Amino acid sequence: MRYLIILLSMLVFITGCSAEKTDTNVQEWTVSPSFEAGNITLYGNQGRLGIIRQNGDGNDLFNVGAGRLYGLYFWGNSDQFKGKYKLVGVHKETEDNVQLYEWDIQTGQNPAEADAFSGGKFGLDKAGLWRLDVYVGDELFDSIVVDVK
């Protein structure tokens, strides 16, 4: 009887832990919302990181295999925006991890009224959800999730 109680307790504990992991994973792969900043509409995390497509046809932010120009806007401490950013894409289904772009970050006036901004030219080769991890220097700054069609 004692072993049965211990076994049931362990089973409840293990089930609770795996349910918690699933909930976190679902949140991690929710498409990032749009928001207004300055006079433009961005996609990402308001007050932290936003992205906008700057060329190409259609209304989708990303289309499979179509390389586009993008604007990235950063909010935070201006001291952290010295140097470059690096953009890494992770595909949800395949877990492919691809470095998409690396470029200098600038400060100054911009249409989003952000603390810093930069640009990028890249494309994503598979449809589905992608997490875009943005590193400033060697540290993860923020991540957004996009749906590539």
Image: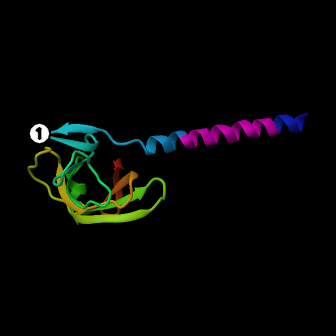
Asked whether, in this view, residue 18 is left or right of residue 97, the answer is: right
Q: Mainly helix, strand or loop, the magenta region? A: helix
Quadrant in the rendering for residue 81? bottom left
**Of the pair 10 and 92, the residue shown nearer to us:** 92
Please state the horizontal and vertical placement of residue 43, each as a whole percent of the image.
26, 44
Q: What type is the residue that disc 1 sits on?
A: Asn
Asked whether, in this view, residue 122 is left or right of residue 125, the answer is: left
Q: Is 38 located above or below residue 84 in the figure?
A: above
Residue lying at 34% horizontally and 63% vertically, measured from the top left: 138
Q: Which residue is mark 1?
A: 39
**Of the pair 140 and 89, the residue shown nearer to us:** 89
Q: Residue furthest right?
A: 1
Please state the horizontal and vertical placement of residue 145, each as a whole percent of the image.
36, 47
Q: Residue furthest left?
A: 109
Residue lying at 79% horizontally and 36% vertically, measured from the top left: 8
Residue lying at 45% horizontally and 62% vertically, measured from the top left: 96
Secondary-structure class at tag 1: loop
**Of the pair 122 and 86, the residue shown nearer to us:** 122
Quadrant in the rendering for residue 36? top left
Q: Which residues are magenta?
A: 7-22
Q: Is residue 137 magenta?
A: no
Asked whether, in this view, residue 40 is left or right of residue 51, the answer is: left
Q: Is residue 14 magenta?
A: yes
Q: Is 107 located above or below residue 17 in the figure?
A: below
Quadrant in the rendering for residue 113? top left
